[in-house]
Amino acid sequence: MTTRNRQATALTLACLCAAALLPSCTNKSPEAGRPNTAPPPSSVPTNTSTPSSGGSTPSGTPTDVPTRPAAAVGSTLAAGEAFIGYYVDLLNYSYSTGDPQQLLAESDKGCVGCKGIAGYVQKINAKNGGLQGDFKDQLVDVKEIYRGKSGRLGGSASLKTGTYQERATPGATPIPQPAGTGTMEFTLAASAGHWVMYEMQINE
């Protein structure tokens, strides 16, 4: 959550002006989308898919894509809260395998933060050696979740990671990253009767 969120913040600032032009994406709206904190795009694979704190290595790359749990089906507040846990699983799968397709499938096409994370994992992931150690996000809890006037859900969740190493490129020197905590601010929108990530930002 450290370096990858710093890179994401840079992308967020770059996109902030464009987002400000959209009424549904302004910070004044309680359920509005928040600017993204995800890094720039690239391409390569990584390794696992659960919000657990085990470090993954290329040798342990999982093949099973997380599937939406029954609790996250529908458009209730409870389904929205369960969706956050599912989305963290998708984040971890992407960090591990470098494959953000399912993450993006569960995100709104206009989600800047989701696209930023997708670009980051394609470049830096466990499968290509870009991430090693306890890099997975663990969902501590969904601190708040509420329905806005537009019908979207807004809220925040607490995340934490362990210590890990990150390489910007395959031959680069690994950069140690300390264990840390962060807050995911999110907005969910209904699509085909279920929640998808409309916008998100992870703050350290």
Image (spheres, rainbow, N blue to C red):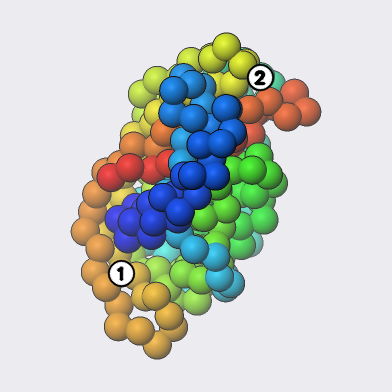
Image vertical order of residue 112 relative to residue 143, above or below: below
- Residue density around tag 2, few if under 14, some if 14–19, many if 20 or more, within 10 Å: many
Q: Is residue 1 left or right of residue 32?
A: left
Q: Nearer the viewer, residue 196 or 127?
A: 196
Q: Please tell me which residue lies in front, 39 or 10.
A: 10
Q: Quarter-wise, where is residue 69 in the image?
A: top right
Residue 100, x across and y down, in percent = 61, 57
Judged from the image, the secondary structure of the residue bearing numbered disc 1 is strand
Question: Relative to residue 79, is residue 31 drawn left or right?
Answer: left
Please give the name of the residue rendered at 57% of the width and 12% of the height, measured from the top-left corner: 149
- Residue 75 in view, yes or no: yes
Quadrant holding the C terminus: top left
Viewer-proximal residue among 13 and 133? 13
- How many neighbours does mark 1 have within 10 angstroms: few (below 14), some (14-19), or many (20 or more)? some
Provide the secondary structure element on which disc 2 rests: loop
Q: Position of residue 11 (x, y in %)?
A: 45, 55
- Identified by mark 2, the residue type is Ser
Q: Identify the residue shown where x is 48% and y is 21%.
A: 29
Outermost residue toward the bottom in this view: 171
Mark 1 and 2 residues: CB-CB less than 8 Å, in contact? Answer: no
Q: Which residue is mark 1?
A: 165
Q: What residue do we see at 49% from left, 63% from top? A: 40
Q: Position of residue 124 (x, y in %)?
A: 46, 69
Return the residue at label 2.
Answer: 75
Three-letter code, disc 1: Gln
* 151 or 1, nearer to the observer: 151
